[in-house]
Amino acid sequence: MASWSLTQRGLSRGLRLSASMHASYGRRMTSSLPEHLRKALAYSAMYPDLLPEPDLTRRNYVREMLERQDMLSRRRAIDIPEFYVGSYMSITVSDQNAPGKKNTFVGICIYRRNHGLRHQMALRNIVENEGIEMLYDLYSPIILEIKVLRLQKRLDDDLRYLRDALPEYSTVPWDMEPEPHREQGSVPVDETRVIMKPRPWTQRWERKELKGVKEWGLEDRFFKRAVEVSKPWEKYDLMKEYRCMVPLEDQYVVWKEVEEHRKTIEEEHKRSRRRKLLDA
Amino acid sequence: MAIPPLKIAHRIRPKSMKLRCIQEAPGRVEKLRVMLGGLIRHERIELNSHRAAETRDYAERLIQDAVLYGPHHKRSMEMASFWLKEKELVHKLFKVIAPRLENETRGFTKIWVLADPEKTSYEPGGLPGVHYKNDWVALEIKNNPLPPIRPNPTPHRSLYIPNLLLAAAAASIA
């Protein structure tokens, strides 16, 4: 693991360091990324909320700095664990009108959206044969506890198609206990592939290139049309890809603070989580 | 994919290249492929400033990936072989251009503003036709073996004609 000073040096010397690192490692390492790039990649999957908006016309550096301070201080106050789209979660919020003044919802995280303090996540579950989705602001002060019941990813980054899939695929048991998971290493991928309900759907899912659907239940003409309107060149559009990303220089500013936070606060949170697991 | 920052001020939003008679999206890709191929092959091309700015961003990304990741990186190779149709240009990108620009810190390409070419006639000796070469620029890859384009040296401010006239008037009054 390279230290942050190495990353800083890489930043100050620009790209040339990583290029020369490549040259020194020789042919063996060329297929993999340099260490600081790999770290930035892992963190941007782990904390998408801490990254600013990629759209340059909407950037405001002062606002981003203030928001990041607020987010990290909120993360100090409550334990916001690492989670991904597809993880099973339970969220407890304070609710004046609920018995015990607390309300808990359990479900599968189907999407995450927005950047910074406005980051939101949606949980979906089936309640009395009715699909229910709860949209939470991750940094809302009414959130009392966030628990990850099963840490996993799914085949797709957006699971909104579960709305039009059979209900068994978005059902999470209400009395589920948190499953222990490895704190190091890669996150397991749940390779469940769903069966869709018959049309009408909320969107034309056959056009979205989904990996996690097994049975569509559609006629051939839908797939023919999907091929007609598909845009296969878009995945090669270098500038489109570039415009969707926060430049690494800006990411380093964020990840440096996050590194500090991980060393101090998150270790503490992890220890208390382990203690709770042992006590239970 | 972690993308290192570009070393030039790239376009914030893509702009339409106003291509006539072809569908915009795939036609744009085809046009960009032609222009990128020309740029890598000849190292300097002359074109409209709009298209030059659009092509430049893509060329910068291609060359940067080639410099940074090299020919053994799967994705860079895939990108290069999509944008450059001829196989020899892919070789040239990774074997000639990337090593040459390895220590470049301020962008790999350069745009020179040229004078618009003169109106020419479609028939020999006929009247000049429409002026279709507007905003004419040269887009080149740095450190190329071609003879350099020098910009016109800017005259000192005191040599501007209004300033000369004003100075003469002031001298005649005094």
Image (cartoon, helix red, strand yellow):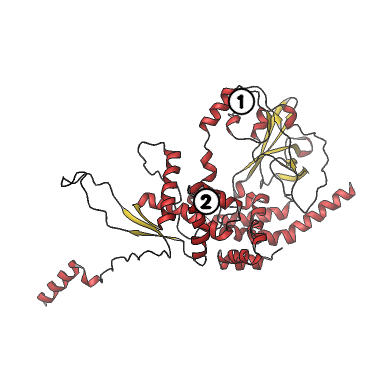
From the viewer's perspective, is A177 left or right of A154?
right
* B51 shown above or below B151: above
Work out which residue is located at the far left of the displayed protein and give it. Answer: B172
The percent position of residue A19, horizontal first and vertical second, equals 58, 64
Callouts 1 and 2 on one subunit = no
* B152 shown above or below A68: below
Q: Quadrant of residue A6?
A: bottom right
Viewer-nearest residue: A161 or A88: A161
Residue name at image x 21 percent, y 48 percent: B120
* B7 shown above or below A79: below
Work out which residue is located at the far right of the displayed protein and give it. Answer: A279
Identify the chain of the residue marked 1, using the numbered disc in the image: A
Identify the chain of the residue marked 2, using the numbered disc in the image: B
The percent position of residue B19, horizontal first and vertical second, equals 37, 41
Q: Is residue A170 visible?
A: yes
Residue ID for mark 2: B80
- SS state under label 2: helix
Task: From the image, state whether disc 1 or disc 2 is nearer to you.
Answer: 2
Residue name at image x 53 percent, y 58 percent: B94
* A217 shown above or below B163: above
Work out which residue is located at the far bottom of the displayed protein and give it. Answer: B174
Viewer-nearest residue: A10 or B61: B61
Residue ID for mark 1: A201
The percent position of residue A50, horizontal first and vertical second, equals 63, 52
From the viewer's perspective, is B127 left or right of A64?
left
Kindly identify the amino acid type of the residue bearing the numbered disc 1.
Trp
Give the CA separation, mark 1 to mark 2. 39 Å
Viewer-nearest residue: A33 or A159: A33
Binning the other alpha carbons within 10 Å of mark 1 as few (below 14), some (14 to 19) or many (20 upward) gives: few
The percent position of residue A192, horizontal first and vertical second, equals 74, 35
